[in-house]
Amino acid sequence: MKYSEKPLVGIIMGSSSDSRIMQAAAEILDEYEIKHEDQIVSAHRTPARLEEYAKHAEKIGLKIIIAGAGGAAHLPGMIASHTTIPVIGVPILVYNDKHPKKTDTAKFSAFGGLDSLLSITEMPSGSPVVAVGVNKAGNAGIYAMKILANEFADLKKKLKQHKLDQHNSVMKESEKLKTEGLSKFAKKKFK
């Protein structure tokens, strides 16, 4: 079995508004040709569906579930309670797009995503969920790759190349900074 032939990663989110954040996980997996299955599963609005999804995930052989949720962020922990598949939680900063007054203060969660982060990381002993930073779905995709790389040697090579590319990018920018000087470099970089 190859990771590009059948889904090995499930990406789930609590609502369609989470898709703007969760797409970063899908983009990473797509870049490395890791097949994934994406669904909306709400811990609060569709609890029976959540349990069904956990059974479905095990039945089709998913190796990892990436679960994104905002606010109380129960989705990652609840899905983990129904399966032995490792769960990577993505805390999402809630955007209140439905607020009648579209002001800056009405746009975001009062806690800036900290509510979601704490909800995911503070699982009871014996029921762990790994968490990435707030809105860091791309990191969840990379973490899923790292887990799969233990099984697929070619994926491990791709990850090593990814790390080397990151290193080379920083070295190139550092050399450019040194050559141009900080003032000129910063003006170009952040125009």
Image: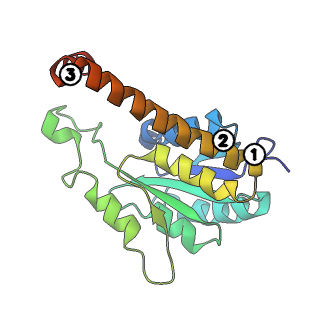
- Mark 1 is on which residue type? Asp
Relative horizontal placement of residue 52, taking residue 12 as reference (left or right) = right
Q: Which mark is residue 154?
A: 1
- Mark 2 is on which residue type? Lys
The tag earlier along the polypeptide, 3 or 1, is 1
Marks 3 and 1 sit apart, C-alpha to C-alpha, by: 40 Å
Whether residue 122 is visible to the viewer of this picture, yes or no, is yes
As drawn, which residue projects farthest toward the right? 1
Where residue 116 sits in the image (x, y, percent)?
Answer: 33, 59
Where residue 55 sits in the image (x, y, percent)?
Answer: 70, 65
Q: What colour scheme has been applied to the protein in the rendered image?
A: rainbow
Name the residue carrying label 2: 158
Where residue 101 sits in the image (x, y, percent)?
Answer: 16, 33
Element at label 1:
helix
Q: Are marks 3 and 1 in contact (CB under 8 Å)?
A: no
Q: Which mark is residue 181?
A: 3
Identified at 76% across, 52% down, the residue is 152
Whether residue 40 is visible to the viewer of this picture, yes or no, is no
